[in-house]
Image: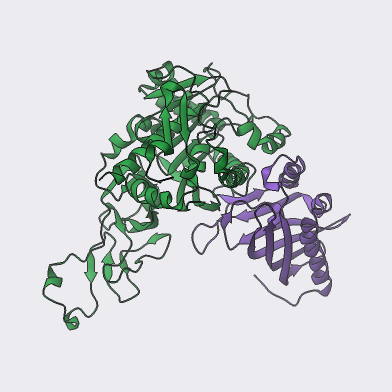
Chain colours: A purple, B green
Amino acid sequence: MRLSMADPDAQRIAADLIARDGLFLDRCEWDEWLALYTEDCVFWVPAWRNESETVTDPDTEVSLIYHDSRVGLEERVHRVRTGKSVTTMPMPRTAHFVSNLLVTSASAGRIDVHSSWQVAIYQPRSATQYTLAGRCEHVLRGTPSGWKIASKKVILINDRVPTLVDFYCL
Amino acid sequence: MNPVDLSRLVDDRPSEGVFNVHRSAFLDPDLFELEMRHVFEGTWQFVGLESQVAKPNDYFTTTLGRQPVLVSRDAEGTLVCLLNSCRHRGAIVVPYASGNAARHVCRYHGWTYASGGRNTGISNREDGRYPEAFAAQDHDLVPVARFANYRGFLFASLSADVPSIEEHLGESKVFIDLVADQSPQGLEALPGTITYTFEGNWKLQFENGLDFYHFASTHASYVDVSRKRPPAAGPRWSEEESADQGTFMFGRGHAVMWSNRNSLLVQRPISQDAEAFAALKARVGPVRAKWMHINRNLNIFPNMQLIDVSSLQLRVWKPLSVNRTEMTSWCLAPIGEPAAARRLRIRQYEDFFNPTGLATSDDNVIYEWQQAGLAAQAAGPTQGYQRGLGAPRGGGNAHATELGFRPDEWMTGSFGMGSETCFHPGYREWARLLGKGLAP
C-alpha cells in the first residue's frame, strides 16, 4: 500500500460518502443507503482463516458476507421490509462511528480509502448491547450521478457473532 | 422440582400418545451442571475433522464438555487427542486454535511435549530436588479415555465406558457415508470457520436441526427473498422419489429428518456440473445418488449436526451455560469439486447458514424467544413433541431398505408433516446418560 499526501478533495469526498454510509443505516433510510452503491458493487466481509488472517478468495473460501452486486444488498433490505424476519422484531438500534480515514490513492474517477470503525448495537427486545469493530476498505467511483461506493470490504475483528450480524451492523 | 427426577424431566409414553420435556430442562443451572458432566463429558462427542490435521504435527484445539483438548497428528502420523493442560501446574499448553508444531512448550515454566504428547523436557529437572517418586510418574500429556476416527469424522469421549464408535453411531453411519462418499478423495472443510453465540439452551439448536415444521414460518422473510430470484431448479430435489418427507430414528440419540422439497429452487452443488455428477452416479449408484440430493439433516447426539441441503454444513455446539450456547460452523465440500460448483456451494452456504446470512439469523433469534418464553413455567408443559406421535411406529420401510439399513423407528408423510418424534431419541439418550450418571 503506497501512502501519499491525500488530495484534499478526495479526503472530503471520502469522508462525506462514508459518513452517509453509516448515517443512512443508523436512520434506517434504506433507499438512500442503497443509492450510495453502484449496481456492480462488491460488499465483502471475509471470515477469518485463523487467529491472524482473513480469507482472501471468496470463490474458494467462506466469507461472513459476500455480494458481488447491489442485488445482494437489495435482498437484505427487502428482507427487513417484509416485516417477517424476527431479527427485526423490533429493529435493533445502531450508531456507526468512523475514524482514521486515510485516502490511499486518488484519481479522476476512483478513490481508495481506509478507515477504522465501530458500531454500537442495542437490542431493545432484550436490553442487550454489543460493539462490533474493525477496519474498512472502500473503493469509491465517480459516476455521472456523483461519487458512489463500488466496493466495501469490512474486516470484522470480533468475529464470534453475537446471535446475528446484518448489513446495518457494519 | 428436584433436577434428578428424570421421569418428570422426560415424560416418555408414546403408546399413550404422550411425550413431554419439562421446561426446567432448558432453565435449571443445576441440571446444566449435571448434563455437562454426564452427557458432554460422559459419551462420545464430535471433536473435528481429520482434514484439519492432515499433515504430521498439525493440530487443533477444542473442548470436550468443559475440558480443553488438543487433537494432534504426531510426527509418525498417528492421531491423538490429549487434555490440553500442562502436567506441571495445569496451564494450557497450546493457546492457538490450530497450527503445525513438532513440539509444544508450556510457557509458564517451560515443560515441553512432542506433538504426540510425550514429555520431552522438564526445565532444570536435576536442580529441582524432586522426590524419588517423581521419576516414576508419567509426565506426558494425558490422552482422553476414548478417541476414534469414523471416515474422517473424529470423536472423543472423556468416559471409557462407551462402546466402539461404530456401535455408538449405529445405522446413522449410513448418513455420514452419504456425505463422505460424495468424492472419491473425501471431504474437506473450507477455510473460514464461522462461530457465533445465542442466548439460549443448546437443546433448542439440537431440536431445530431436525425441525422441518418451522421453515415456512421462521424463514418467511427468506422465502420472500428467494421468490424474487430466478429459479435454478424444480421444487423437488429428486424426480425419481415420489415421497415428500420423512424421519429415521436411531439408538443412542441420533436421528435424521429428510425432505424432497427444494424450497429455494436452487441447484445442488454436487449436480451443478453434469459431467461430475454423471461420474458420481456411476460410482455410488442411482439410489445413493438420489439420496445425496434429498435434504438430509443428521443429528449425531449430543453435539453435532450435518445438514446437506442447498449446501453442506457441519455444525457443532458448545454449551456455555444453561442459557448460552456457542456454535461453530463449517462449509464442507467434496475434494476435487469443479470451481463453479464450489463457488455455488459457498454462496448458498453463506446465504442460508451464516449468522450473517438470511436464515440462521432468524433461528438464533427464535431460540432466544424460546428461552425467554420457556421461563413461563406456570404455563405448564409445552405441546412441541407430538407431531407424528399419532402415526404407526417401528419396523423397516422402503426408503431404509433401498439404502440397506434398518432404523429403530421411522416416519413418512407429506411436506406438511414436520414430525417432532425425531427429537425423541435425543431426549431418551439424554435421560439415559443422566440416569446412568446419577445412579448410586
Q: Residue furthest right?
A: A145
Residue furthest toward the left? B132
Above/below status of B355 relative to B341: below
Q: Position of residue B79 (x, y in %)?
A: 29, 51
Q: Residue at x 76, y 42 (%)?
A: A78
| Quarter of the image that includes the N terminus of chain B | top left
Q: Against B201, is B122 above or below?
A: below
Q: Is residue A89 left or right of residue B128?
A: right
Rendered view: B236 above or below B266: above
When asked about the image quadrant of residue B404, the answer is: top left
Which residue is rendered at x = 41% and y = 49% of the image? B31
**Left or right of residue B353: residue B336:** left
- Of residue B235 and residue B364, the one placed in the foreground of this image is B364
What residue is shown at x 29% (from left), y 71% (from top)?
B89
Q: Residue B252: x percent and y percent? A: 35, 35
Picture mark count = 0
Name the spot of residue B48 as percent of width and height, x first.
Answer: 39, 48
Residue at the image point whose x is 46% and y is 48% from the top:
B317
| Left or right relative to B143: residue A63 | right
Identify the image quadrant of the C terminus of chain B: top left
Is residue B400 shown to the viewer in this render?
Answer: yes
> In this view of the protein, can residue B279 be seen by the observer?
no
In this view, the residue in front, B144 or B52, is B144
> Where is residue B27 drawn, in percent x and y?
50, 48
